[in-house]
Amino acid sequence: MFDHCLYFNTTALARQLEREWALAFKPFELTPPQAFMLRAVIEQPGMLQHQLASLLDIARPTATRALDGLEAKRLIERRSVEADGREQAIHPTPKAVAMKKDLNQASGAVTARLKKLLGSDSFAATVESVKGVRSALK
């Protein structure tokens, strides 16, 4: 019935992928969105909140809620920016930095498993195709 429906197939795929990464990040007590956000903060300490939202392609209120959760877990700190008191820079805590290798390995294990199931070429082509569709729809 929905074989040719982009919405149905991408959301069904998103739910399946959500389950995969939820299992990977469960030992860290993080949801996939929190884990990917934390990985970005660890890689780019001091990133402004609006830059983080843009990088993850999410709305600022969505970023705020996710950051609230990471802050409650003592994984990030928000610091006011001198140039603009309304803006905040996001920094990982030492606890978060210590998790970097394990978070990356957990995510990498999911990616490796998916590449094995799909084949590396098919995996790469699918990612590029989805990125292309996202870009075209902006």
Image (cartoon, helix red, strand yellow):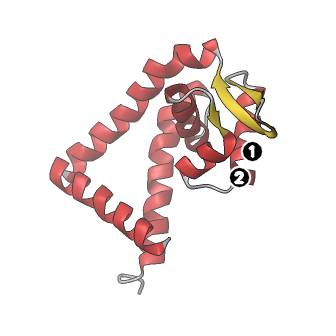
Q: Which residue is mark 1?
A: 64
Q: Which residue is mark 2?
A: 60
Q: Is residue 124 left or right of residue 90?
A: left
Residue 93 higher or lower than 25, as above or below: above
Q: Residues within 10 Å of mark 1 (few under 14, many from 20)?
A: some
The answer to which of 129 and 83 lies nearer the viewer is: 83
The local secondary structure at tag 1 comes to helix
Q: Is residue 45 left or right of residue 67?
A: left
The amino acid type of the residue labelled 2 equals Arg
Q: Is residue 90 left or right of residue 55?
A: right
| Residue under the point 75% across and 52% down | 61
The answer to which of 8 and 49 lies nearer the viewer is: 49
Residue 84 higher or lower than 102, as above or below: below
Q: Quadrant of residue 76?
A: top right
Look at the image and tell me in which quarter the N terminus lies: bottom left
The answer to which of 69 and 16 lies nearer the viewer is: 69
Q: Residue furthest front?
A: 83
The answer to which of 45 and 127 lies nearer the viewer is: 45
Percent x, y of residue 105: 38, 26
Percent x, y of residue 121: 16, 52
Q: Is residue 29 left or right of residue 110?
A: right
The local secondary structure at tag 2 comes to helix
| Residue under the point 29% across and 46% down | 114
Which disc number belongs to residue 24?
A: none
Q: Residues within 10 Å of mark 2 (few under 14, many from 20)?
A: some
The amino acid type of the residue labelled 1 equals Thr
Q: Residue furthest bottom?
A: 1
